[in-house]
């Protein structure tokens, strides 16, 4: 958990735990923070509440980081497994899941800062697989019942998760959603996703579900951003992240896989049995998804990190794009990426998914807007 209180009362919170759902916060960077850095005790009642979450299913343990201005406190509570084992530590590694999304967006914003991308650029220049899109006439219709897209997909559409294709839980069981899953365009452990060029080829065989820019849809846009960053820069997405974000921010423990010597710091990922509700290991540390470099470095949910690394990223945003005197992002870029760009209708769809489907509160783990 990372909780950062601003001087005027705004706050952000991210929960990272040995549990199948990681949760991430939305923050307002327009608050200047003090430069002091020391640990201090948190409110005893809050600490009691946090400790009360552990030692019971579904949460065997967690790591909580609280920050106010430049003052930081860390709590490592419970164990890394339901059956006990090693205790949680400050340097425990966590699957970032959907809290990978803001990092992916920051990488894209670097390219906007450098004018290597512009918001209204058609993405087909770098992603020719998405040229000449066709759109389903009905979201539950056959895949060949389509009309031409009214305009090309642009960078803005991908940044706001409105490019026209994504996970729509109200459309589960339709031909298009079945095709998305059958093509392996989303993570489906233990089956790995294909490498980026093959992933793009498969994506390009499908029609869009919606006209570009019209509807907010979950997940696929952020993986597409990772491919876009790689194609624009000529580097792998992981290399670009490491050189332009992780190394400048001192995020030494953040990446898409965990080395053999650090796998003992990564808890297993649990999932409930659909019939009994009992938790079982869905993704182990050794031999699991993050134990070797992935074929597809997923910008949507593929990163592993620690509370201190992720806190460094948030502090950079709170400091308007600056870390340790070095500018990572321009202030306008930070303001752009932390300002809601969705229409009320698009926001309603996003909120409905958070509230009714994945049962998380506003802003947690759902970039797009």
Image (cartoon, rainbow, N blue to C red):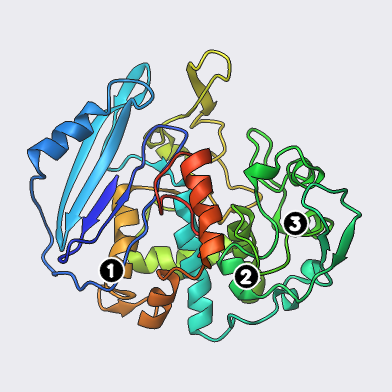
x and y percent of residue 181 in the render? 73, 42
Looking at the image, residue 128 sits to the left or right of residue 55; the answer is right
Query: Badge 2: how crowded within 10 Å, few (<14), some, or many (20+)?
Result: many
Which residue in the structure is indicated by mark 2? 157
Q: Using the numbered discs, state the Cα–Cα distance from disc 3 to disc 1 in whole angstroms.
A: 36 Å
Looking at the image, residue 258 sits to the left or right of residue 155; the answer is left
Q: Using the numbered discs, state the Cα–Cα distance from disc 2 to disc 1 in whole angstroms.
A: 25 Å
> Is residue 81 at least partly visible in the picture?
yes
Which numbered disc flags the more N-terminal residue, 2 or 1?
Answer: 2
Residue 5 in which image quadrant = bottom left
> In the structure shown, which secondary structural element does the residue marked by tag 2 occupy?
helix
> In the structure shown, which secondary structural element does the residue marked by tag 3 occupy?
loop
Looking at the image, residue 277 sits to the left or right of residue 10; the answer is right
> Pointers 2 and 1 in contact (CB under 8 A)?
no
**Closer mark to the observer between disc 2 and disc 3:** 3
x and y percent of residue 261 in the render? 42, 38
Which residue in the structure is indicated by mark 3? 209
Of 7 and 252, the residue lying toward us? 7
Which numbered disc flags the more N-terminal residue, 3 or 1?
Answer: 3
Q: How many marks can you see?
A: 3
Is 127 situated above or below 22? Answer: below
Which numbered dot is residue 246?
A: none
Q: Quadrant of the N terminus?
A: top left
x and y percent of residue 110 in the render? 48, 76
Is 80 situated above or below 92? Answer: above
x and y percent of residue 249 in the render? 34, 65
Which residue in the structure is indicated by mark 1? 318
Residue found at the far right of this picture: 144
> Pointers 2 and 3 in contact (CB under 8 A)?
no
């Amino acid at each position: 958990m990372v909780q950062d209180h601003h001087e005027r009362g705004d706050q952000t919170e991210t929960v990272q735990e040995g549990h199948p759902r990681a949760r991430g916060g939305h923050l307002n960077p327009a608050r200047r923070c003090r430069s002091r850095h020391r640990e201090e005790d948190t409110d005893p009642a809050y600490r009691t509440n946090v400790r009360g979450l552990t030692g019971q299913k579904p949460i065997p343990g967690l790591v909580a980081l609280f920050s106010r201005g430049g003052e930081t406190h860390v709590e490592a509570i419970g164990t890394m497994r339901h059956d006990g084992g090693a205790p949680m530590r400050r340097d425990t590694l966590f699957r970032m899941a959907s809290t990978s999304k803001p990092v992916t967006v920051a990488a894209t914003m670097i390219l906007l800062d450098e004018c290597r991308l512009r918001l209204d650029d058609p993405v087909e220049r770098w992603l020719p697989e998405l040229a000449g899109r066709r759109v389903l006439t009905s979201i539950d219709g056959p895949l060949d019942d389509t009309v031409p897209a009214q305009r090309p997909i642009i960078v803005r559409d991908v940044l706001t998760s409105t490019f026209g294709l994504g996970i729509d839980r109200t459309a589960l069981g339709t031909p298009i959603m079945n095709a998305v899953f059958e093509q392996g365009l989303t993570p489906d452990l233990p089956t790995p996703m294909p490498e980026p060029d093959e992933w793009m080829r498969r994506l390009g065989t499908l029609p869009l579900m919606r006209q570009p820019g019209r509807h907010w849809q979950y997940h696929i846009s952020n993986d597409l951003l990772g491919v876009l960053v790689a194609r624009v820069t000529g580097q792998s997405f992981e290399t670009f992240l490491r050189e332009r974000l992780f190394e400048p921010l001192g995020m030494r423990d953040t990446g898409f896989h965990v080395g053999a010597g650090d796998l003992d710091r990564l808890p297993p990922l649990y999932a409930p049995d659909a019939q009994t509700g009992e938790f079982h290991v869905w993704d182990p540390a050794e031999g699991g998804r993050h134990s070797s470099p992935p074929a597809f470095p997923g910008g949507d949910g593929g990163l592993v990190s620690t509370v201190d690394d992720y806190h460094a990223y948030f502090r950079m945003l709170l400091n308007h794009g600056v870390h340790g005197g070095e500018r990572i992002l321009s202030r306008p870029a930070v303001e752009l990426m932390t300002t809601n760009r969705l229409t009320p209708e698009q926001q309603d769809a996003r909120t409905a998914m958070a509230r009714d489907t994945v049962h998380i509160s506003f802003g947690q783990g759902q970039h797009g807007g």
